[in-house]
Image (cartoon, rainbow, N blue to C red):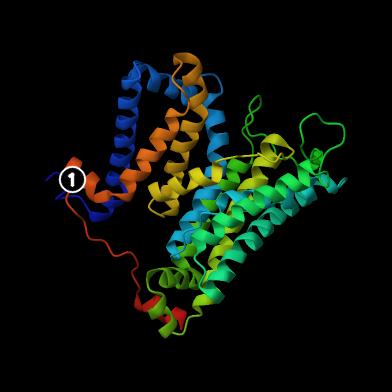
Amino acid sequence: MITRRLPPWFVNALLVPLASVLCGFVVAGLVVAATGSDPIAAFSSLFQGAFTNQDAFAETLVSTTPYLFLGLGIALGFRAGLFNIGAEGQYYVGGLAGVFLAYSIHGVPGLIEIPLALAAGMLGGFVWSGIAGALKARFGAHEVITTIMLNYVAFLLANYLIDGGLMLAPHVSTPRTPEIDANAQLPIIIAGTRLHFGLILALVAVPLVWFLLQRTTLGFRLRSVGFNPTAARANGMSVGQTLVLSMGISGALAGLAGIVDILGVSHHMTDTVGAGYGFDAIAVALLARSNPWGVLPAALLFGALRNGASFMQLDTQVSSDLISVVQATVIIFVAAPVLVRWIFRLRRQQVAEVQITQREETAAV
């Protein structure tokens, strides 16, 4: 087989995800063809809208930025054995907390006000996801159920605070919060575009999360609990504390995505801001196979799909909902790697999920 001489990490971390993406586009192309449209023309327009049109790539990077934060947060939860479905709600709560501080404070230099707003967003996401972590640690409540329920609470909370009037800007036709202070706005990287400094923060977050997971005692404990909580407990680790902290950090990254999007793009918040980012980011983390470095290309792919969909629909009259077909089929194939290996005749590779070295054991003790 063609993969016999390839290293296992290359097949599992690169070839299988790429093959999953290819399968997703093939299925989407068949759907387009079944409707009587030309899939080649549709995907060509999608590419133009995402990369080659004027300022298209900058807009794609704008859409990629929240996917990076959210994908990193969900991937970190996966490594701890937690399936965080609540990134959407944590994104909202982080946005609410950060935007309140950003429009309430005036006359403070940006070097102070921006970090304060970012910290408020992270704190909001941390607390919101920490609720689910605490419920799991104390009562064994499954995080999938609790985070889904907390999503609805977050949506209704945003609706109550913004539409209800407590955070409503005066004299506006569409319900939204007041504009943030000018000093709280993230700087624009490329003049004439909306590409802002949040992209730099997201790119810096990738190696930081990797370092946390792979080079710190906390990361070792997090991975150990995710791999085998019983063994971790027998080794003297506090499983409950680790679960709460893992969910909190995951939510903090999601909350950071929410406030960065507001400080960099909209400069205010509505009760529908960034709708869908949190759920799409689950696919980003799955495609990245919970690897922080893998989140980078996966987020770029989903950012390109999100940004190019509208031009594709305008240019070819193929519905932008086609992107949902691509995303859904990619998730299906990522979740069924055996099927992908069978289709592309990829040899099965055995890779340990967690490798515990003697140095890590000593550090943990």
Q: For the image shown, how many numbered marks are present on the structure?
A: 1
Where disc 1 sits, the SS reads: helix
Q: Residue at x 28, y 40 (%)?
A: 19
Q: Nearer the viewer, residue 289 or 14?
A: 289
Where does residue 146 sit, x and y in percent of width and height? 55, 61
Badge 1 is on which residue?
342
Q: From this view, report whether residue 178 is shown above or below residue 132.
A: above
224 sits to left or right of 94: left
Report x, y in % for residue 333.
Answer: 31, 44
Q: Is 175 positioned to the left or the right of 61 in the image?
A: right
Res 203 visible = no
Q: Observer-nearest residue: 208 or 341?
A: 341
- Expressed as whole percent of the image width and height from the top left, the position of residue 312 reads 46, 20
Residue at (40% x, 79% y) in the render: 230
Horizontal side of 155 relative to 104 (left or right) equals left
Q: Is residue 72 left or right of residue 192?
A: left
Could you tell me residue 300's position as x and y percent? 46, 38
* Residue at (51% x, 16% y) in the render: 314
Q: Is residue 287 above or below residue 223?
A: above
The quadrant holding residue 324 is: top left
Question: Badge 1: few (under 14), some or many (20 or more) residues near its Cα, within 10 Å?
Answer: few
Does the image show residue 239?
yes
For badge 1, the amino acid type reads: Trp
Q: Which quarter of the figure has residue 361?
A: bottom left
The residue drawn where x is 35% and y is 67% is 354
Q: Residue furthest left?
A: 1
Location of residue 234 with respect to 280 vertically, above or below: below
Above or below residue 108? Residue 266 is above
